[in-house]
Image (cartoon, helix red, strand yellow):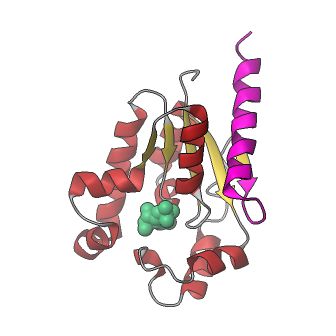
Amino acid sequence: MQGKHLILIGFMGTGKSLIGRLLSERMELLVTDTDQEVERESGMLIPEIFAQEGEEGFRNREKRILANVLQREPQIITTGGGIVLLPENVHLMQKKGWVVALDATEEELIRRLSRDRSRPLLTGDVTEKVRRIKKERQGLYDFAHFKQDTTHNSPSKTAENIWRQWKAVFSSTKA
Ligand code: S3P
């Protein structure tokens, strides 16, 4: 696995968790999701953490978990959409991983997220929130080594594209 983690970043609803699981099957590598690890470690669901500790509490937990997971053996890591908000997270991911950014058009994200009840940042008017947060985060995912737009591609097609690129990048550096 060339010593690097394969890290998926991207806005909520871009398909990180599902594509991570597909990659995990294809590459026969462990997949760890930072949101799930935060929930496991805290014994709380993400909406409960936001309610009790605020977004700052969640970000602190997320930062700690990311640093911890990055110290494990190289694997696939899927992340929460806001992990890029802290520069120290970006720095660590750049250093220890091959980072893939997933994206989709605003319309498609709104469609995918419109019935969501699990994301505290989207309570209320999902359309307005997605538009606002997407604008606020503009450029923050651009540091990735590879980018995939998932608007029209199926999750399995996207996973295949990522896998091909991974092989192209890492087999050319092996010789
Ligand atoms: C968040 C995204 C969520 C989760 C939390 C905050 C964000 O993960 O970490 O609700 O700030 O974008 P997903 O991107 O998996 O939805």
Residue 24: give x, y in percent of width and height: 54, 40
145 versus 156 height, above or below: above
Work out whether residue 21 or residue 91 is closer to the camera in this orientation and state it. Answer: 21
Q: Is residue 60 magenta?
A: no
Q: Residue 92, position in %: x, y?
A: 48, 38
Q: Position of residue 147 (x, y in %)?
A: 72, 49
The answer to whether residue 5 is above or below residue 84 is: above
For the stretch drawn in magenta, the main secondary structure is: helix
Q: Residue at x 72, y 59 (%)?
A: 154
**Quadrant occupied by the N terminus:** top right
Q: Residue placed at 77% from the left, 19% from the top?
A: 172
Tell whether 164 sits left or right of 80: right
Residue under the image location 30 percent in, 71 percent down = 54
Residue closer to the observer: 56 or 40: 40
Q: Quadrant of the C terminus?
A: top right
Residue 104, relative to residue 21: is it above or below? below
Residue in the picture at 73% in, 71% down? 105
Work out whether 127 lies above or below 33: below
What is the x, y in percent for residue 40?
27, 53
Residue 117: quadrant of the picture: bottom left
Which residue is farthest top?
175
Using residue 109 as the reference point, say whether residue 31 is left or right of it: left
Q: How many marks?
A: 0
User: Which segment is the magenta one?
Assistant: 148-175
